[in-house]
Amino acid sequence: MGMTGRIYRAALCAAAIFTLSIISAGPLRAEAPGLPAPSDPAARGLAIAQESDKRDRGWGDAKADMKMVLTNASGETSERALRFMMLENTDGDGNWSLMTFDKPADIEGTALLTYPHVKEADEQWLYLPTVKRVKRISSANKSGPFVGSEFAFEDFSAQQVGKFTYKWLRDEPCGDRTCHVVERTPQYEDSGYTRQVVWIDTTDYLFRKTDFYDRKDSLIKTLTYQDYKLYDNKFWRPGELAMANHETKKSTRLIWQSYAFHTGLTKDDFSTASLERAR
Amino acid sequence: MAKSSRAAFFAVIAALAPACAHAEDLSLRGTIEPELRLFTQSASSARQKDTDMSVSGELTGKYMWGDGDQSLIVTPFARLDQRDSRRTHWDLREARYGLVMGKWEVRLGFDKVFWGVTEAVHLVDVINQTDIIEDPVKQEARLGQPMLRIRTTQDFGTFDAFLLPYFRERDFPGINGRPAYDIPVDMDLTRYESSRKERHIDGAFRYSHHLGDIDFGVGYFQGTNRDPILTPALSSGGDLVLSPYYAQMKQASIDAQATKGAWLYKFEGYWRRELDREYEAATGGVEYTFYGALGTEGDVGVVAEYALDSRGLMARDPYENDGFLALRWTANDEASTSFLGGAVVDAETGAMGFRFKGERRLSDDYRLSAEAYFFGNVPRPDPIYSIADDNYLQFRIARFF
């Protein structure tokens, strides 16, 4: 091979490396590094879920207020108001949470403490303020409606990566972004779903939409995540979650307000004893 | 309520009042709940009527400061009753100061404490006096108890120590009251074993913890038994009445629950020493919930429990050898509709009691509840014989503000 050949080859290599670096540099910002190829949809789906989980690490603890607006088929609404305390759990078993009802008035002060687990059953305690009683409750109620809303208990409690198996389906535009479309199948007992299809954007790895398929594998509910805001320059949280039930035509909106991170909460604030404290 | 304890209490509140000067975290909530009771049988006394109207109100003032670590909660409760002057009563359900310091917690004042796990009978729950005129059959209402409570929550469990400086006497229906004992209780004839009477200082201790799917508690109480011994006596007017006698007792108790999927297994038991006698009582059972029962969004729960008392029919507690069965349906709808049907059968006497309860929210601020209590096949020796002719329906509408 002559000189020209060598230069030609070097140029070609440089071009190739350059091109490769562009391709990989793009995904370095957008797609996770080393995301498995589309030819292995299970590994790719899992990696997308793990990346989404990883990008949200380090928030420590948080407090937030939530307003829940229930709308029935004829358009009538009723409201619930709750306060949340959350503690990040980095061992993969899921974050601890303590929610307290402010509305409706007849259950004001009722509180629910949850220690989720991936392998064993979640641990849950309910505090009943009128009788000052802390009750350990069964966490087998996964598919039942949460306080009459279109959200099931599992829509809150089962969000850890390890609770599902995954299958990447495709990438497609979602709003002004591109989304990985991933199917996830619940691996925990008592789920009301055969599968869920989630849209996770390729830029920030945020959930944009979830389709829920019931036990007969028909599309029953769709959840959309709206008004994402960046807190502490690092953590994205949706301002509103809207769940539409396609069968009953009822819907529930969760409106999140006054998010605060690193508020100094510790495990002591999530003990069964702490349930009895004034909040 | 005695004047001295009330005065002591207002002194505490007055001492804390400066903290309330900048009330930025003050909340005030309340309930007003009219009630109608209809009795379906003819009364055993001409003074008892077949209908009763009544209204109750409760107000909760809550003030929190120091990032929520300090709190002051005051909850007065009152009821006005058309027929029974005894049922027209008021109580400080809560009036307490609370302080949280990391793993430690202190509470001072009138407060309510619940011990136990079972649904039908609450055996080990000894701190508060039962408000029997508020809830004569199920007996779940409690009077506020003055106390100093110190709690610490460690990795190996929660410890509670209670100092109970003042005893709250049980309230009983008056001569017009219904349901009521056939012979009225005369609270002017109350006697105590302790010479300090209601000023006897009681103490209690509890350790509780959870390990995996087991939750358990061990308790100890020493002081005035909340449950009086009723003996026939003559009132100052010469009428036959019942005189309450409050003995001193020591109680050691255990309560435990195992949560296995949709199954709950529950047990409570105590050992007591009172008036140089020892006795034991235990209760336990299972609870199972069918989630999404019959293809609906509702749940059906089944509770089966049994209660046993070593005193047998001599027990003052009516549940000395009794089985309970209850069915609970929760619709999980927007109105939180629920129905409960329960039965109790005394294995010794064959006496039966039935309870039905339905509830639903009418709007965000109103809740309707209907209850029915019926007794059947109650022989004379059974402890509930006296109220067996007081079957009743009860309707309540609560307004929250």
Image (tube, grey):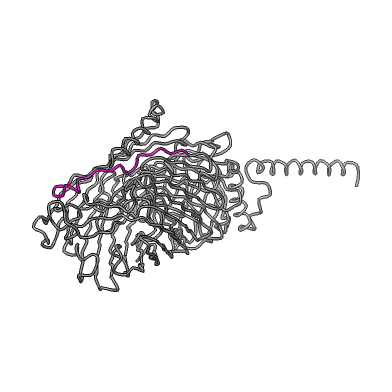
Residue B63 pos. (x, y %): 38, 34
- Name the magenta segment's main secondary structure: strand
Is B83 or A83 nearer to us in this picture? B83
| Residue shown at 12% from the left, 56% from the top | B48
Residue B372 pos. (x, y %): 21, 60
Image quadrant for the C terminus of chain A? top left
Quadrant position of residue B332: bottom left
Can residue B306 be spotted in the picture?
A: no
Instruction: Report the number of numbered marks.
Output: 0
Q: Bounds of the magenta span?
A: B81-99
Give above or below for A228 relative to B346.
above
Query: Left or right: B332 with respect to B377?
Result: right
Is B169 or A88 nearer to us in this picture? B169
Query: Left or right: A220 with respect to B359?
Result: right
Residue B377 pos. (x, y %): 20, 71
Q: Residue furthest right?
A: A2
Residue B198 pos. (x, y %): 32, 47
| Residue shown at 8% from the left, 57% from the top | B46
Give above or below for B353 relative to A64.
below
Is A213 or B1 nearer to us in this picture? B1
Give above or below for B346 relative to A91.
below
Quadrant position of residue A162: bottom right
Is B265 or A232 nearer to us in this picture? B265
Query: Left or right: A238 with respect to A104?
Result: right
Can residue B157 be spotted in the picture?
A: yes
